Structure formats: C-alpha cells, structure tokens
Image (cartoon, helix red, strand yellow):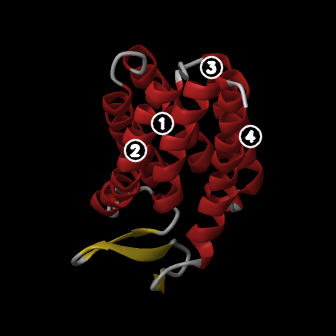
Amino acid sequence: MTPDRQRWTEGLVALVLFTLTIPAANWMLGNVGTVCVPNGPCLVPVAPGIKAPSGVLMIGLALVLRDIVQRRLGAKVGLGAIFVGAAISGFLAPPAIVVASVAAFLLSELADFAVYTPLQRRRFVTAVIASSLVGLVIDSIVFLWLAFGSLDFLSGQIIGKAWMVLLALPLMHLLRRRDERLGLVAA
C-alpha cells in the first residue's frame, strides 16, 4: 500500500470512529452509568468519590480522533468533520439537551482545532495533549451550563475526558513513530 493510500485509509477509519463517538456519547448519557439522576444524566465514577455523566468517555475520545482525522485528511476535512459532528449531535441528542450538545461539541472541537493546527507538524503528541485539554474544558463548561444550568459535575467531566485522552497518548506516540518510519507526512 502506498503511503498516500495508507494515510487516506487511516483517515477515513478515524473519521468513521469520530462520527460514531457522537451518537455513542448521547446514548450513554441517558443509558449507561452506575446511577442515573432523575431528569438528569447517568453517571460513572471517574475518580474516587467523583462521578461524571457517562458521555464524557466518548467526548474525550472524539477530541483525539478529530486530531487524527486532520493529521490524515487535512484541515478542511477536519473542519468539515466538526460541522457534520455538530449536526449529528443535534439530531441525536435528547430533546432537552440538543442546544447544549451542539454548542458544546462545536465550540470544543473548534477550540481543539485552533490549538492543534499550529502545533501538529512540529510536535504531534504535544498538539494532541494541548488541544484536547483545551477542548475538554470548554466542552465541559458549555455542556453542563447549558444542559443543567450548573457546573456541579465539572471536575468529573474534566477528569473523565482527560482519562480518555491519557489512554490515547501512547497510541499517538506510536502513530507518530510509525509515521516517521514509513515516511507518512501529515496532510
């Protein structure tokens, strides 16, 4: 397989996975957790004594996958994925949280894009870390405030998303090393 074809194939796989994280997050929010709050989210433990809405796990992953989409398919496709993801989020979110879901997704992914883009060619892993951290904080604040009018679960949201980013970092490091070995360059 040629490097361009491999880059394209991997980019499409990341794009599909990124797109799937959106309905998964919305579904998990109302269906997966150790406890489900009446008229609120289902919660999962993310640290001792700290719980977060379960969808945070998918959103942390989405931030990393969008970075891979951009690395493999380019900035325009990365931006397109953000807007398609926001539309999917709007169609699939429970009615009570549509605005919160779309706004949080759109703002956090655009912030991720703005931080990731200038850093990614020189320091890929650093770009993933920095952009994901900025994106997950913005997503957490915007979503919680618009969906529930409170920041009660803010620490849990940030911790839960950060876990997903931390779990992805060794894979990002391996991806960068493999790219160097195979001569794959960012789109």
Work out whether mark 2 precedes mark 3 in sequence or the reverse, and give the earlier one.
Answer: 3
Could you say whether the residue bearing mark 2 is in a helix, strand or loop?
helix
Query: Which residue shows up at 23% across the image and 78% down it?
Result: 49
Q: Is residue 78 left or right of residue 186?
A: right
For badge 3, the amino acid type reads: Gly
Q: Position of residue 182 (x, y in %)?
A: 53, 27
Is residue 111 in view from this perspective?
A: no
Residue indicated by mark 3: 74
For badge 1, the amino acid type reads: Ser
Q: Nearer the viewer, mark 4 or mark 3?
A: 3
**Closer to the camera in the image, 33 or 174:** 174
Q: Position of residue 117 (x, y in %)?
A: 46, 18
Count residues near mark 3 (Cα–Cα under 10 Å), then give few for <14, some for 14-19, many for 20+.
some
Q: Nearer the viewer, mark 3 or mark 1?
A: 3
Looking at the image, residue 1 lies above or below residue 186: below
Work out whether mark 4 precedes mark 1 in sequence or the reverse, and give the earlier one.
Answer: 4
- Tags 4 and 1 in contact by the CB under 8 Å rule? no
**Residue 108, numbered circle:** 1
**Residue 136, numbered circle:** 2
- Tags 2 and 1 in contact by the CB under 8 Å rule? yes
Work out whether mark 2 precedes mark 1 in sequence or the reverse, and give the earlier one.
Answer: 1
For badge 4, the amino acid type reads: Ala
**Closer to the camera in the image, 133 or 152:** 133
The residues bearing labels 2 and 1 have C-alpha atoms spaced at a distance of: 7 Å
For badge 2, the amino acid type reads: Leu
The residues bearing labels 4 and 3 have C-alpha atoms spaced at a distance of: 20 Å
Work out whether mark 3 precedes mark 1 in sequence or the reverse, and give the earlier one.
Answer: 3
The residues bearing labels 3 and 1 have C-alpha atoms spaced at a distance of: 19 Å
